[in-house]
Image (tube, grey):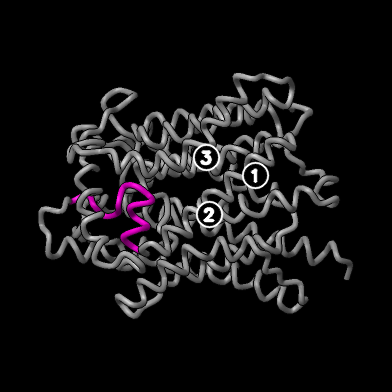
């Protein structure tokens, strides 16, 4: 058997794992909202999950575990497993949350295994562009499905802005929910998937796809998602300009964005004194920081907000996470987890900058989008699988690994290469 055949098999397994993760994120909730009822997005509320939704959830979770584990076994048998330094950086926040959660509840979730296996899978994957393009196509799929549901099944796929606290609809007076349970869930997914759409091969389909995803994002009314998505596109646009000509002002603006995005995550919390600010997030932040003093090193584990809600009825019905990634990580995993998160952010941004300097403008925006989304949301807690995990977890690993792989001669000659200084 030639070397190309096992590599092709590995690519098929990896692609299947991403597709199953996508299905795991959306199919159970799609079945729930179409055959049952949409759960109330409120902390402590329970709902009756339909049997078909529950069954699909169990099956798809198993398929994700099986395919990611199959990739691990494939490389283990061929003795081609790789554990590069970036992989430990990828695993560090998850390890911190897992340790804290185990101390609190003496359990470890299946999603932790999925997170780790996704990192190992991508460490051994030889062509990151292929996977990013797959994520881009799936992002377009969920955007198209959500928009179609909004048009054809408005009673299922739309929510009135009156039913979402402090929401402001950009299109009419409705918010697009699609197959998810809350417009912010869909908004964050589309925001994180938007940069990957820039990797689609054909310029016309790429442009149409960007418009479709932006329209879906606008319809969700997710202001944080829209801000993150547009800022990511701005970064890509500036890098595109700089690959064609020197522009001092564009470079200054770009440097400002890269320097500011991480500090803003902290300053937006530390400089706020209004509990009602940012749709009540100010109150959640102040109370979260108060609780964080109780375990500043290791935090309280992934279920901390649910445990707080049981004894603090006035904490806030929507405080199912910290609504700021730094705050959320601090409360879940303490200073250890927060330090791991900050290092992860900085290394991803550094890789993004170096990719931009090499001319790979379409690969630059994702880390910026991810950090900006964390200003007012928590796109992942590195422990629980959510609507966003199918794109966030692979892209975290790809953002850390792509630079080295794209610098190698084998990828430089790849037919699946990302548009670079040619400007296609």
In three-dimensional space, the C-alpha distance between marks 1 and 3, rounded to whole angstroms, equals 18 Å
Q: Which residue is mark 2?
A: 344
Answer above or below: position of 341 versus 84: above
The range drawn in magenta is: 317-332
Please tell me whether mark 1 or mark 2 is closer to you in this view. 2
User: Distance from label 2 to label 3 (Cα)?
Assistant: 12 Å
Q: Which label sits in the foreground, 2 or 3?
A: 2
Q: State the SS at label 1.
A: helix
Q: Is residue 74 above or below residue 243?
A: below
Residue 190 seen in this snapshot:
no
Q: Residues within 10 Å of mark 1 (few under 14, many from 20)?
A: some
The Cα atoms of the two marked residues, 1 and 2, are separated by 23 Å
Q: What residue do we see at 34% from left, 24% from top?
A: 171
Of tags 1 and 3, the one toward the viewer is 3
- The question of residue 98 being in magenta is answered with no
10 Å crowding of disc 3: few (<14), some (14-19), many (20+): many
x and y percentages locating residue 239 in the rendered image:
65, 29
- Callout 3 secondary element: helix
List the residue tagged with mark 3: 368
User: Circles 2 and 3: CB distance less than 8 Å?
Assistant: no
Q: Quadrant of residue 46?
A: bottom left
Residue 133's label in the rendered image is 1
Locate the C terminus by quadrant.
Answer: top right
């Amino acid at each position: 058997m030639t070397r190309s055949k096992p590599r092709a098999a590995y690519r098929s397994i990896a692609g299947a794992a991403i597709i199953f993760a996508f299905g795991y994120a959306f199919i159970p909730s799609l079945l729930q909202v179409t055959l049952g009822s949409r759960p109330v997005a409120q902390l402590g509320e329970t709902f009756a999950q339909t049997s078909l939704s529950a069954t699909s959830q169990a099956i798809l979770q198993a398929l994700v575990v099986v395919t990611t584990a199959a990739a691990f076994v494939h490389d283990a048998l061929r003795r081609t497993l790789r554990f590069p330094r970036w992989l430990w950086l990828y695993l560090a926040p998850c390890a911190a949350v897992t340790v804290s959660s185990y101390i609190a509840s003496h359990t470890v979730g299946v999603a932790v295994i999925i997170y780790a296996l996704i990192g190992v899978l991508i460490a051994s994957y030889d062509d990151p562009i292929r996977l990013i393009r797959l994520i881009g196509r799936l992002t377009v799929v969920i955007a198209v499905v959500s928009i179609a549901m909004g048009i054809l099944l408005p009673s299922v796929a739309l929510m009135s802005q009156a039913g979402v606290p402090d929401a402001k609809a950009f299109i009419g007076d409705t918010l697009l929910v699609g197959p998810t349970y809350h417009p912010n869930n869909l908004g964050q997914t589309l925001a994180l998937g938007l940069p990957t759409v820039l990797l689609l091969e054909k310029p016309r389909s790429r442009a149409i796809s960007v418009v479709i995803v932006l329209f879906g994002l606008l319809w969700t009314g997710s202001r944080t998602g829209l801000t993150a998505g547009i800022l990511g596109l701005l970064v890509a646009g500036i890098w595109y300009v700089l690959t064609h000509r020197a522009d001092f002002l564009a470079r200054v603006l770009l440097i400002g964005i890269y320097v500011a995005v991480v500090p803003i995550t902290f300053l937006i919390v530390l400089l706020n004194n209004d509990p009602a600010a940012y749709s009540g997030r100010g109150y959640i932040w102040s109370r979260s920081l108060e609780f964080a003093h109780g375990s500043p090193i290791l935090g309280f584990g992934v279920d901390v907000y649910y445990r707080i809600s049981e004894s603090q009825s006035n904490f806030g019905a929507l405080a199912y996470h910290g609504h700021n990634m730094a705050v959320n990580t601090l409360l879940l995993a303490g200073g250890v987890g927060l330090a791991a998160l900050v290092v992860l952010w900085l290394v991803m941004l550094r890789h993004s900058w170096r990719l931009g300097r090499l001319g790979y403008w379409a690969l630059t925006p994702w880390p910026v989008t991810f950090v900006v989304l964390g200003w007012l949301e928590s796109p992942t807690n590195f422990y629980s699988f959510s609507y966003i995990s199918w794109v966030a977890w692979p892209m975290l690993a790809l953002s850390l690994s792509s630079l080295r792989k794209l610098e190698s001669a084998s990828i430089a000659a790849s037919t699946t290469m990302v548009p670079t200084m040619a400007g296609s």
